[in-house]
Image (tube, rainbow, N blue to C red):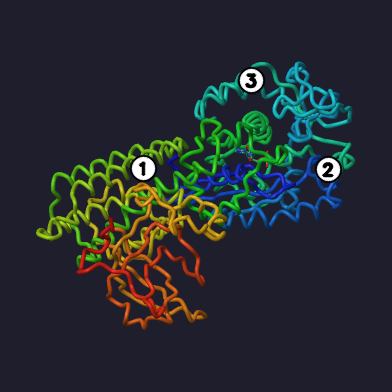
Amino acid sequence: MQTSNKFYVTTPIYYVNAKPHLGSLYSTVLADVAARWNQLQGKKTFLLTGTDEHGQKIAQSAQAAGKEPKAFVDGFIESFKDTWKAYAIHYNHFIRTTDPEHVKAVQAWIIKLKEKGDIYKGAYQGYYCTPCETFVTEKDIDTSVTGPDLKPACPSCSRATVYMEEECYFFKLSAYQDKLLKFYEQHPDFITPSERAQEVISFVKAGLKDLSISRTTISWGIPFPGDEKHVCYVWADALNNYISAIGYPHNMQEFNFWWPADLQVLGKDIVRFHAVYWPAFLMAADLAMPHKLLVHGWIKIGGQKMSKSLGNVVDPQELLQKYGADAVRYYLTRYIAVTQDSPFTIEELEQHINADLVNDLGNLLNRMLTLAQRNGLATIPAPAHWQESEVALQEFCSDMIAEFSAEMNACMYHRAYAHLWKYINIVNAYFHAQEPWKVVKNNPARFAEIISATAHALSAIGLLAWPAMPQKMEELLRMLGQSYEPGKNYLQLLQNAPWNQTFVTSMQGPLFMKILAPEPSETKTESKPEASAPAFPPITIDDFGKVALLVGTITNVDTIEKSDKLYALTVDLGEHGIRTVCSGVRQHFAPEDLLNKQGVFVANLQPRQMMGLTSQGMMLFAKDETGKLKMATVAGSVPNGSRLS
Ligand code: MSP
């Protein structure tokens, strides 16, 4: 665990021959979660991301698009920046390898290595994989596999390599073999997870060859200092972004503050570049080693890596429209295990949004707030003494914070969030067992204790879930009358502070929206029923059970500008929360006809956008013989939230 008060984290820089996909988002979300986790401990953080713009692959893609490489890459930059912004990726710097400062930094690094005698001129003869931008050595080639045109296949991506012979400059990688092995031995935590470290160590032990770091058969790259018919090999260019972006060598004060990186996030396909070449490049430049590489697995679709070339990519912008940024961030953090490849399906995403976010967390918050507000406890004081059941809840919370922190510090984010959700389930079980909705009737003091304990637990949950879901958790904290303030060591506060807070609560609508299965096709109902067919085809009791018909009181009636039909009703559905329901009955009822009346609502209809508002249910009416609408209601008053059955 790093103890210094700064935290520098990097993402890989992305090839810009397409828009970002869910795999790119995954690497970036992990880095953002890491940065925010350290911010939660009051640290100064720096998150670096950006784009890898040079090299043969980009040059070929630009040519295929009929564009100059720079104009081609420029065309994708906004899609990266927009996606990161939409997903609340709070990066401090977005580096492009075409930035002049970066170009100068790479050239300065080459000059330094030349002076040290670590670079010499020679000729490369062998295979090259353009999609991976990598020189494939004879020993790595899998001769049992060949690419489509019978060229040896790349061991990493299985695509055909090309044979090439060209003059180039070599970096004396072989001279760093022993130093690297010693470094891995002395820093067993350098590569996480440790299985990846074993692969790297075996690779280095098998013998390192010097690495070609220049190309003469392409021109889209950084001119090689002193010999400008060469351009820098794209990986030697790209890896240096991690130091050039923070000031190397033009602002050494800034650089010395942030370097070495505390965490570098990358996918398993690029581990060799980061765990072998990069440390050797740094050793050659007399620079310190990064503290940790987090090597994650792949997101798979139908058993295959999601990738542009396979054409099976998921567009983060499309997910955003339907599910919102934080739900997707949560899913990636919790369910794409950093240690292995994980499948991705929309069904799983939706299922976890409904189960974890809507049911476990959102409903708990909603029920607690609704009960508190309805029973005059909008401001929730802390009791002078806690009962045994609340002491236990607090102890569970301390244990969870310890487990959660250990997993977050080890970058095992999926496990950390599993611990947090275990605790959310404990709080849910506590809340149900205490039955505050019954207790309130004859023991308001005890009711206040239950509500206060739940609010304390939710506040801790909100803070710890903030790295994964910053926007939703800031909303949750606001509903508890709190705000997230950068720079505070919240972890320390959570670990040490007794449960003695007063919460000034407010309701702001449900935190998460349930995702409902698409409506079945309505083509049948469009055709006229046959004369003998019943007007309403029979349904089973199970079908009926799917509809949540609840009684609620209309506590506010707002007219909607630009609509002469719609009202926005605020409806108190008891323990099911306070909802906004849009209803097109303005021509039938004046606001006072509806205000404070109890009506019947379909409470589990898929939320619908109406005139800029989200309608979270439907109010029921029937027409009288003159065509005038009458409210559906129950005879006599019943508690809000009562279900019609
Ligand atoms: N440009 C290089 C990195 C240079 S870093 C100095 C590169 N770019 S990339 O766009 O191809 O990939 C960037 C990152 O996205 C890698 O960490 C890669 O593992 C990750 N992902 C790409 N597809 C992925 C999945 N399907 N799943 C998870 N991550 C994946 O490599």
Other-residue count near label 3 (Cα within 10 Å), few / some / many at <14 / 14–19 / ≥20: some
Q: Is residue 141 left or right of residue 385?
A: right
Q: Is residue 457 left or right of residue 309?
A: left
**Upstream in sequence: badge 1 or badge 3:** 3
Residue 463 shows in this picture: no
How far is disc 3 from disc 2 in space, using C-alphas?
A: 37 Å
| Residue at 41% in and 59% down | 474
> Three-letter amino acid code at disc 3?
Asp
Residue 359 locus on image (x, y percent)? 36, 49
Q: Nearer the viewer, residue 123 or 611?
A: 611
Q: Nearer the viewer, residue 109 or 299?
A: 299
Numbered-mark total: 3
Residue 460 locus on image (x, y percent)? 32, 50
Q: Is residue 513 left or right of residue 166?
A: left
Quarter of the image where one finds residue 372: bottom left
Q: Is residue 32 above or below residue 187?
A: below
> Three-letter amino acid code at disc 2?
Gln
Give the number of the disc on residue 60. 2
Q: Which residue is mark 1?
A: 421
| Residue at 19% in and 51% down | 435
Residue 531 locus on image (x, y percent)? 50, 59
Q: Which residue is mark 3?
A: 178
> Three-letter amino acid code at disc 1?
Trp
SS state under label 3:
helix
SS state under label 1:
helix
How far is disc 1 from disc 3 in space, using C-alphas?
A: 45 Å
Residue 425 locus on image (x, y percent)? 31, 43
